[in-house]
Image (cartoon, rainbow, N blue to C red):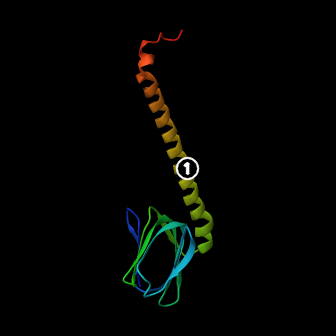
Amino acid sequence: MRLTVTTPLAAIVQVEDAVHIRAEDSSGAFGILPGHADFLTALAISVLTWRDARRSEHHIALRGGVLSVSAGDAVTVATPEAVAGEDLQRLESEVLTRFRQQLEEERSARTESQRLHLAAIRQIMRLLRPEARYAAPPG
């Protein structure tokens, strides 16, 4: 099988001889073998592992993304960020922890941005009310 892993800036992995691929989505881990049915899923922050024709295992940490299988022999992963490495322990402990922390920081920033946006809308609505225009200013 052909395996391609890309980020917005680069193709991180391009192999032609993958015989088994293991990935993870929100429902859990799954495997892909040659001849797999067409498939599309959103990946979790996880490590994708593949075995080549020489039975060597390779790993890449993914910051989520989308995995698609087409024609039973082409697996494509598009992810915002990926780190390849042979040390599975390091990828799982350091890289995935960093990816999860970045995701939480992004969620927090989005929440704060929405909070500020709603506060601005409330203030505008308060100023646009007809009764607010003719009321005496405070103080």
Whether 108 is drawn above or below 90: the answer is above
x, y (%) of residue 73?
39, 84
The C terminus, quarter of image = top right
Question: Residue at the front extreme?
Answer: 131
The N terminus, quarter of image = bottom left
- The amino acid on which the numbered mark 1 sits, given as a three-letter code, is Glu
Name the quadrant containing residue 5.
Answer: bottom left
How many callouts does the rendering have? Answer: 1
Name the quadrant containing residue 97.
Answer: bottom right
Secondary element type, mark 1: helix
Residue 14 can be seen, yes or no:
no
Seen at 52% across and 38% down, the residue is 115
Seen at 46% across and 36% down, the residue is 117
* Residue at numbered disc 1: 105
Callout 1: few (<14), some (14-19), or many (20+) C-alpha neighbours within 10 Å? few
Residue 109 can be seen, yes or no:
yes
Whether 20 is drawn above or below 133: the answer is below
- Asked if residue 49 lies left or right of residue 73, the reply is right
x, y (%) of residue 96?
58, 64
Q: Nearer the viewer, residue 65 or 57?
A: 65
Q: Nearer the viewer, residue 20 or 128?
A: 128
Seen at 57% across and 58% down, the residue is 100
x, y (%) of residue 90?
61, 69
Seen at 42% across and 12% down, the residue is 134
Whether 14 is drawn above or below 101: the answer is below
Name the quadrant containing residue 91.
Answer: bottom right
x, y (%) of residue 24?
54, 72
